[in-house]
Image (cartoon, rainbow, N blue to C red):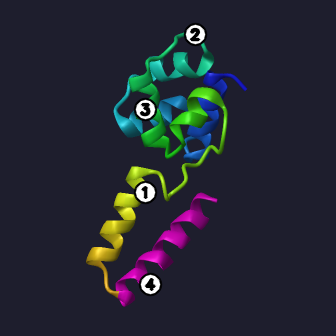
Amino acid sequence: MSLHERLREARKAAGFSTAKEAAEAFGWNKNTVTSNENGNRTFSREAAERYARAYHVDLGWLLTGKGSMKPDPSTDPESAEVFEIYKAILNKREREAWLNMGRALKEDKG
């Protein structure tokens, strides 16, 4: 799978049906995203990092195709930060409610 195909796959896995939908959600230029996904335009490492963060995929996988698409929460700084905040600010009852809400949202995105 090529870089542009992985980018398209990452977008779909993040729940965006089209490049236009993702571009609108993140304030990106639709033509640039479409060109990146079609392989008509190369993109920088910085752009790859932006896509990886936005789509919650592993940067190494996006760039090389090696490893897992989804980042390992134990090594992904953003996931680790979310988990630390989650532990620090929510009590047990609030964590349970948050998990139930997250599960319901995940199921809806299906």
Tell me the mark number nearer the camera, choosing from 1 and 4. Answer: 1
Q: Position of residue 59 (x, y in %)?
A: 51, 36
Q: Earlier in the sequence, mark 1 or mark 3?
A: 3
Residue at point 54%, 49% (across, down):
71
Residue 29 falls in which quadrant of the image?
top left
Magenta stretch in the rendered image: 92-110
* Secondary structure of residue under mark 2: loop
* Secondary structure of residue under mark 4: helix
Alpha carbon distance from label 1 to label 4: 18 Å
Residue on which the image places disc 4: 96
Pick the quarter of the image with the N terminus: top right
Residue on which the image places disc 2: 40
Q: What residue type is labelled 3?
A: Glu
Pick the quarter of the image with the C terminus: bottom right
Residue placed most toward the observer, 26 or 41: 41
Q: Are marks 2 and 3 in contact (CB under 8 Å)?
A: no
Q: What residue type is labelled 1?
A: Ser
Residue on which the image places disc 3: 49
Q: Do the residues labelled 2 and 4 touch (CB within 8 Å)?
A: no
Q: Position of residue 12 (x, y in %)?
A: 61, 41
Q: Which amino acid does label 2 sit on?
A: Asn
Q: Position of residue 72 (x, y in %)?
A: 55, 53
Q: Are marks 1 and 4 in contact (CB under 8 Å)?
A: no
Alpha carbon distance from label 2 to label 3: 19 Å
Tell me the mark number nearer the camera, choosing from 4 and 3. Answer: 3
Alpha carbon distance from label 4 to label 3: 32 Å
Alpha carbon distance from label 1 to label 2: 32 Å
Residue placed most toward the observer, 102 or 44: 44
Local crowd size for mark 2, using a 10 Å CA cut-off: few (<14), some (14–19), many (≥20) = few
* Secondary structure of residue under mark 3: helix
Residue on which the image places disc 1: 79
